[in-house]
Amino acid sequence: MIDIHCHLLPDIDDGPASMVEAVDLARQAVVGGVTHAIVTPHIHHGRWENTKKGIRSVVNKFRMALAAENVPLSIGYAAEVRIGIEILTMLPNREIPYLGRWGEDKVMLLEMPHNRILPGTDKIVSWLMKQGVRPMIAHPERNKDVMRKIEKLAPLIDLGCLFQVTAGSIAGQFGEMAQLRARQLLEMGVVTVLASDAHHIKRRPANLGLGRDAAAKIIGEGEARKLVYDNPLRMVGEQFTVDSLTETEALI
Ligand SMILES: [Fe+2]
């Protein structure tokens, strides 16, 4: 499987606090069947001031640590970018680390506040789309506005956003409402990918396989596989070497 949203890097956001913890979390992902991961540290103005250059530097150290510890996980990187007006300057300044591509568009992982969908979200999304950037909304099923009323997501669906549902939500780890919304989004066929959003080996584990198995019970194994392999591959495949991806395909 290919996990396109996880916080595996040490001491960069609310993910692992040290390289030892980071390697342990990566090992957990591998044991669970993940071969490739795109690490997505938070970029959140005023809270996590991460930059593309800073992320790349930690990624290099992390890759070396994984190699030294014999953890066979290929690492690419992007970021989970918090919605805000800063995006309007980050984009032209080439400060956004993209996940990859979806057709002709670049894809960015966009985080909304957990308690609501901010007014003006549709305007930022429309502007991004005009710049050839397609937002993928991180875990919409956990957003309180969406939990209250699933129709709140309709404008973002209509604008062409992609949607990442979190594995633990489908398995019920974020409560009944998040689980219900995850199920509904799967049944509506609007989910692009599943991802672990792993932060910590115990509190927020790397459990993509659990999500895939829970999703398979709702949409069938073939469709569930698309969400953890085919669609992620289409989106982020360019971050990895062809050789490593061929090996992965043989495993699935
Ligand atoms: Fe995240």
Image: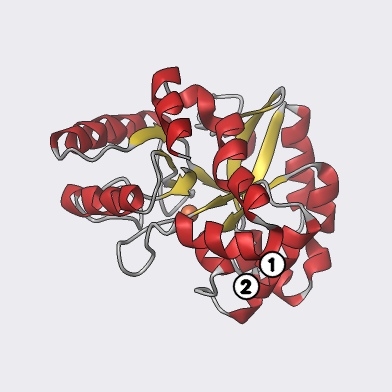
Residue 117 is at least partly visible in this image:
no
Tag shown at residue 166: none
Few, some or many residues within 10 Å of mark 1 (<14, 14–19, 20+): many
Q: Amino acid at mark 2?
A: Gln
Residue 237 is at least partly visible in this image:
yes
Residue 246: image x %, image y %?
Answer: 45, 25
Q: Amino acid at mark 1?
A: Arg
Asked if disc 2 and disc 1 are in contact, CB closer than 8 Å, the reply is yes
Relative to 159, is 86 on the left or the right?
left
Query: Residue at (65%, 44%) from the top-left corner?
Result: 136
Query: Residue at (54%, 57%) from the top-left corner?
Result: 212
Please state which of residues 146 and 51 is positioned toward the viewer in this rendering.
146
Residue 226: image x %, image y %?
Answer: 63, 43
Residue 231: image x %, image y %?
Answer: 62, 38
Tag shown at residue 179: 2
Query: Residue at (62%, 72%) from the top-left corner?
Result: 178
> SS at mark 1?
helix
Image label count: 2
137 up-or-down from 248: above or below: below
Query: Residue at (62%, 34%) from the top-left corner?
Result: 107
Residue 126: image x %, image y %?
Answer: 79, 39
Q: What is the distance, in whole Å, between disc 2 and disc 1 at their CAs?
A: 6 Å
Looking at the rendering, which quadrant does residue 73 occupy? top left
Tag shown at residue 183: 1
213 up-or-down from 27: above or below: below
